[in-house]
Image: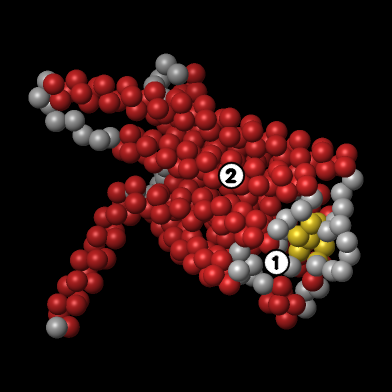
Amino acid sequence: MSSLKNVYFFQAGIGILANTFLLVFHIFTIHQIRRPRTTDMITCQLAFVHIVMLLTTQDILSADMFKSLGFPNELNCKLMFYVSRVSRGLSISTTCLLSIVQVITISPSSFYLSTFKQKLTKYAAIAFFCICCFTLCSNSSMIIYTVAHSNRTNLLNVSKYCSLTTINSIVRALYLILALTQNIFFVGIMLLSSIYMVIFLCSHQRKSEYLHSMSISPRTSPAKRATCTVLVLVSFFVIMYCVDSIISFFSAVLWKYEPVVLGVQTLVGNMYATVSPLLLISSDKRIVVILKKVINMCQTFQELVK
């Protein structure tokens, strides 16, 4: 378990650094540009959600730290687990929102969703606010059933310090149905968006081949690059989500979490929060240019020192 714990902190360290860099970059971009891209704002929100998610699920904000500040263990567990569940819910919904915005951005004027293009930033902000409210309310039951570890029986360990008390079978079934319906809805929207983006990329590829046959040098458009990035992002999220959901479903039904299973689920659940900022950074030409300049400056400085 000690080696698994080292992997936790290595994963969390990379994820937090990458998301922080992405968050700071997009905050400066939004501040400097009069009309920032809607995807910049959503990426900024996604990065912040992932920072909170990594901090709460990896036990970096430990119970001992809150205890030293005067927080009782029970309150600490309720707060940490609730924030963890909310951040996970916002991760899937914000990724879904990003895919929808990308579909609207690349859609032609004949497409019925193109009517949202002119006020896309406004609609995206309203959608994110509604998603936040819904996620906060749908996970509020976790505050009631979360307790600190104790000698009581029939507790389901969900983290290093926290457990869930026994939940009535009807309430548990209703909660599972609600969570499953919500997640299937978001994943379904992402899959539909992905299908549309694949069609767009195929159409763009045919146009590029035609231009190449006419001896015209085709260039990769920013829309195509952004679409490829969102498509890979959504595909990776769906794969990680399916694995995480299978583990969660069987653990909830059997009402049993083995420490190793819980550890593996934590790694899988946070894989998207760690990989997604690295993918977004590597695919953003603005960030790549800045990083190249920084590397050149470091090389020049090293030569001067020598």
Q: Residue at x 31, y 51 (%)?
A: 286
Q: Quadrant of residue 189?
A: top right
Mark sitting on residue 243? 2
Q: Which residue is mark 1?
A: 160
Q: Residue at x 65, y 37 (%)?
A: 183
Q: Residues within 10 Å of mark 1 (few under 14, many from 20)?
A: some
Residue 28 visible within the image: no
Does 173 sit left or right of 106 as displayed? right
Q: Position of residue 153 (x, y in %)?
A: 88, 61
Residue 108 visible within the image: yes
Q: Position of residue 221 (x, y in %)?
A: 28, 35
User: Compared with residue 108, is residue 95 higher up or lower down, i.e. above or below?
Assistant: below
Q: CA distance from mark 2 to mark 1?
A: 21 Å
Q: Position of residue 80 (x, y in %)?
A: 71, 62
Q: Earlier in the sequence, mark 2 or mark 1?
A: 1
Q: Residues within 10 Å of mark 2 (few under 14, many from 20)?
A: few
Q: Residue at x 33, y 24 (%)?
A: 202
Mark sitting on residue 204? none
Does 187 sit left or right of 13 as displayed? right
User: Compared with residue 37, is residue 4 higher up or lower down, i.e. above or below?
Assistant: below
Quadrant where the C terminus is found in the figure: bottom left
User: Tag count in the figure?
Assistant: 2
Q: Position of residue 220 (x, y in %)?
A: 25, 35
Residue sitting farthest toward the bottom: 306
Q: Residue at x 58, y 47 (%)?
A: 91
* Contact? badges 2 and 1 (CB < 8 Å): no
Q: Nearer the viewer, residue 115 or 50?
A: 50
Q: Nearer the viewer, residue 114 or 89?
A: 89
Q: Amino acid at mark 1?
A: Lys
Q: Nearer the viewer, residue 219 or 235?
A: 235
